[in-house]
């Protein structure tokens, strides 16, 4: 407002002097004062916009802080959930020893093409995409494309295993 007040003072002085709009220098002063008045209005509007943006930025920063606290909070908010409950219906759901059932990772036996040695691998070895044969140091590479694994086939196999288990449970309950 300080600039706007100064321009208003200048405008009042010009009107008090009775500047004649027919004289070129006086006309120039009148136009300059009008331009200063418009500039003061623009500066005032920009200042208000900057204050509004600052308020919005503060609100966004507070929201982000809440999200960060929720996501990165070191406190263990999940203590109330017992994931190791032995009475869960999810234990040994498909009856195998896979990680889904709470068992160990699946292991695989592979024959080294170079020396013929049998190598036992688990799921973590397969993630590495290659493993060195312990006998001959030949590098065995594993390339799994998305086409190699069909989720529908896996889902069908899992459903079949679960259905077989349900049928076995029904037979046992009928006895």
Image (spheres, helix red, strand yellow):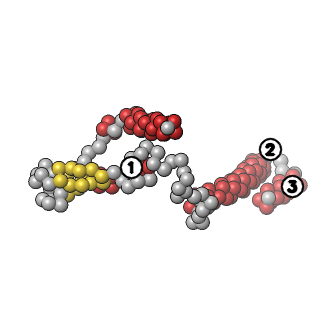
Say the numbered circle drawn on residue 134: none
Q: Residue at image x 38%, y 50%? A: 97
- Asked if the residue under mark 1 is in contact with the one under mark 3, i.e. CB atoms within 8 Å, the reply is no
Q: Tell me which corner region of the image, top left, top right, bottom left or bottom right, holds residue 121.
A: bottom left
The mark that comes first in sequence, 3 or 1, is 3
Is residue 44 visible in the rendered image? The answer is yes
- Which one is closest to the eye, mark 3 or mark 1? 1
**Residue 37 place in picture, x, y as percent:** 77, 51
Q: Is mark 2 on a helix, strand or loop?
A: loop
Q: In this view, does 173 lie to the left or right of 110?
A: right
Is residue 151 visible in the rendered image? The answer is no
The mark that comes first in sequence, 1 or 2, is 2
Residue extending farthest front: 175
Q: Residue at image x 14%, y 54%? A: 117
Q: In this view, does 157 lie to the left or right of 139?
A: right
Q: Residue at image x 37%, y 34%? A: 153
- Asked if the residue under mark 3 is in contact with the one under mark 2, i.e. CB atoms within 8 Å, the reply is no
Q: Is mark 1 on a helix, strand or loop?
A: loop
Q: What element carries label 3?
A: helix
Q: In this view, does 144 lie to the left or right of 57?
A: left
Say the numbered circle drawn on residue 12: 3
**Residue 25 place in picture, x, y as percent:** 75, 51
Depth check, front residue: 90 or 99: 90
Residue behind mark 1: 98
């Amino acid at each position: 407002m300080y600039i706007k007040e100064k321009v208003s003072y200048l405008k009042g002085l010009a009107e008090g002097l009775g500047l004649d709009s027919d004289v070129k220098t006086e006309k120039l002063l009148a136009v300059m004062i009008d331009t200063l008045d418009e500039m003061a209005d623009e500066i005032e509007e920009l200042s208000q916009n900057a204050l509004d943006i600052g308020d919005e930025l503060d609100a966004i920063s507070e929201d982000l802080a809440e999200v960060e606290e929720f996501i990165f909070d070191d406190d263990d908010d999940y203590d109330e959930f017992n994931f190791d409950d032995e009475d869960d219906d999810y234990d040994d759901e498909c009856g195998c020893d896979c990680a889904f059932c709470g068992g160990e990772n699946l292991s695989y036996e592979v024959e080294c093409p170079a020396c013929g040695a049998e190598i036992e691998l688990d799921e973590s070895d397969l993630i590495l995409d290659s493993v060195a044969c312990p006998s001959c140091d030949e590098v065995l590479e594993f390339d799994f494309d998305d086409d190699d694994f069909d989720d529908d086939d896996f889902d069908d196999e899992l459903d079949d295993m679960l259905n077989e288990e349900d049928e076995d449970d029904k037979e046992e309950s009928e006895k």
